[in-house]
Amino acid sequence: MGKRAKLEIPSEILNKFTKPSEYRHLLRLVHIDVRGDIPLYYALTQVKGIGPTLANAIIRVLNLDPNMPVGFLTDEQIKIIENVARDPTKYGIPGWLLNRPRDPQTGKNLHYIGPDLVLRIRQDIELMKQIKCWKGIRHALGLKVRGQRTRTTGRKGLTVGVTKKKS
């Protein structure tokens, strides 16, 4: 029995299955960790405060490929994406795409993302509870806020069913 000869794999085939050295398998994009193989469009929509329309607008403003895996983004591109996500109006994105138009405290069109958005929503709910508006009272009581029916749905605790009377 002789030794087996090692087969050399052609470099063209090998390059199809290996990632280049600048590829990152996991990267931080606007407050979240994102896998490197996800397309840029879907990676942006995973960020709290960035929906599909705003993600598409950010990609168009920066002239990036929406189907490009985020693992190929450079550090400069990530910084620019974060800057556009924090202040979209500065880069020509219209005000109707923002999640906080005419902010009650400042009167400006603002856009919050990530933990800032969560904090702002919590502060708004606390303000509604404090001034005792209708929505604030519903939040405080743990009931549905937006006018949904509550007779049969939204019950917490034991399930209450219909009982037959004994005849």
Image (cartoon, rainbow, N blue to C red):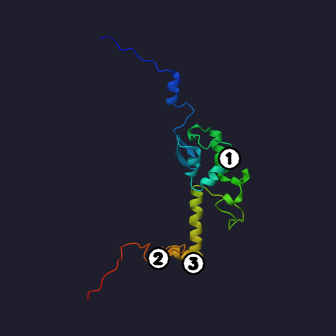
Disc 2, SS: loop
Is 29 situated left or right of 159 in this image?
Answer: right
In this view, the mark in front (3 or 1): 1
**Figure quadrant of the N terminus:** top left
Q: Is residue 55 left or right of residue 157?
A: right
Tell me where residue 115 appears, x and y as whole percent.
57, 56
Query: Which residue corresponds to the image point at 69% horizontal and 60% vertical from the top-left?
Result: 96
Residue 19 location (% of width, % of height): 52, 31
Give the residue number, with chain letter if any, for mark 1. 60
Who comes first in sequence, dot 2 or dot 3?
3
Front residue (pair 133, 158): 158
| 64 relative to 112, above or below | above
Residue 134, label in figure: 3
User: Would you call the spot at circle 1 few (<14 residues within 10 Å), some (14-19), or many (20 or more)?
Assistant: few
Which residue does the numbered mark 2 point to in the structure image? 150
Q: Contact, CB < 8 Å: mark 2 with mark 3?
A: no
Amino acid residing under circle 1: Arg
Residue drawn at (36%, 74%) of the image: 159
Residue 150, x across and y down, in percent: 46, 76
State which quadrant residue 110 falls in: bottom right
